[in-house]
């Protein structure tokens, strides 16, 4: 309850990340958050996300992948930082449409959280597989571990 208004965990996380400058510059949007996972969408902006070959830059895909991890950890009430991220680039897309990343926690320990995610294009084609090891720095007081 904040100022007499109840906010569910997804609303709390959306509000917290609404001022994330990095995500805002890259135009990354939160599509859905649930306990233990999230989906983000990045509408492809030709002037921001593409490389000189007219495909989406690998760094833009890595940034999209990395952004989902903080939200995924927050969804279980944890503040984390990335220890390791491994990305397998399977395909690429031209500078059109959008990419989405969907994550889920595969292990939640006391000091680390392991996450997997997939990046897909608008047609549902798999673009990247990503695995992460996150270091748990603190508890996120506003979000319960289970909801």
Image (spheres, grey):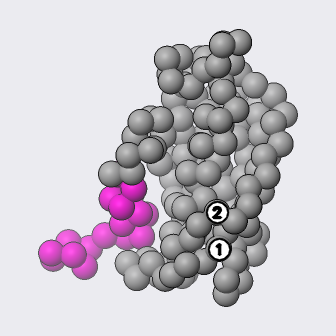
Q: Most extreme residue toward the top, as rendered?
A: 53
Identify the disc placed on residue 60.
none
Question: Percent from the top left, x then y, of residue 87?
Answer: 78, 46
Separation of disc 1 and disc 2 at Cα? 6 Å
Residue 137 or residue 38, whichever sits in front: 137
Question: Residue at position x 70%, y 32% from top?
Answer: 58
Question: Residue at position x 64%, y 63% from top?
Answer: 82
Residue 91 or residue 87, whichever sits in front: 87
Question: Residue at position x 55%, y 46% from top?
Answer: 40
The residue that disc 1 covers is 135
Question: Percent from the top left, x then y, of residue 136?
Answer: 60, 77
Asked if residue 2 lies in the magenta stretch, the reply is yes
- Above or below 100: residue 18: below
Q: Is residue 31 left or right of residue 130?
A: left
Q: Quadrant location of the N terminus?
A: bottom left
Q: For residue 41, what is the image quadrant?
A: top right
Tell me the magenta residue range: 1-18
Question: Percent from the top left, x then y, of residue 93?
Answer: 71, 21
State if disc 2 and disc 1 touch (CB < 8 Å). Answer: yes
Asked if residue 6 lies in the magenta stretch, the reply is yes
Q: Most extreme residue toward the left, as rendered?
A: 3
Residue 33 or residue 136, whichever sits in front: 136
Question: Percent from the top left, x then y, of residue 44?
Answer: 54, 25
- In the structure shown, which secondary structural element does the residue marked by tag 1 occupy? strand
Q: Is residue 35 visible?
A: no
- Above or below 82: residue 1: below
Neighbour tally class for label 1: few under 14, some 14-19, many 20 plus, Cα within 10 Å: many
The residue that disc 2 covers is 82
């Amino acid at each position: 309850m904040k100022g007499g208004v109840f906010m569910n965990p997804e609303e709390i996380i959306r509000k917290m990340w609404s001022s994330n400058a990095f995500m805002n510059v890259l135009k990354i949007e939160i599509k859905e958050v649930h306990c233990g996972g999230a989906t983000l969408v990045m509408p492809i902006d030709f002037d921001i996300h593409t490389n000189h070959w007219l495909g989406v830059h690998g760094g833009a895909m890595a940034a999209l992948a990395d952004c989902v991890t903080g939200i995924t950890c927050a969804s279980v009430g944890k503040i984390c930082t990335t220890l390791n991220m491994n990305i397998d680039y399977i395909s690429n897309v031209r500078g059109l449409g959008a990419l989405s990343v969907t994550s889920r926690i595969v292990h939640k320990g006391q000091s680390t959280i392991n996450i997997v995610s997939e990046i897909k294009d608008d047609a549902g084609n798999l673009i990247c597989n990503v695995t992460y090891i996150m270091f748990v720095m603190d508890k996120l007081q506003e979000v319960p571990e289970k909801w």
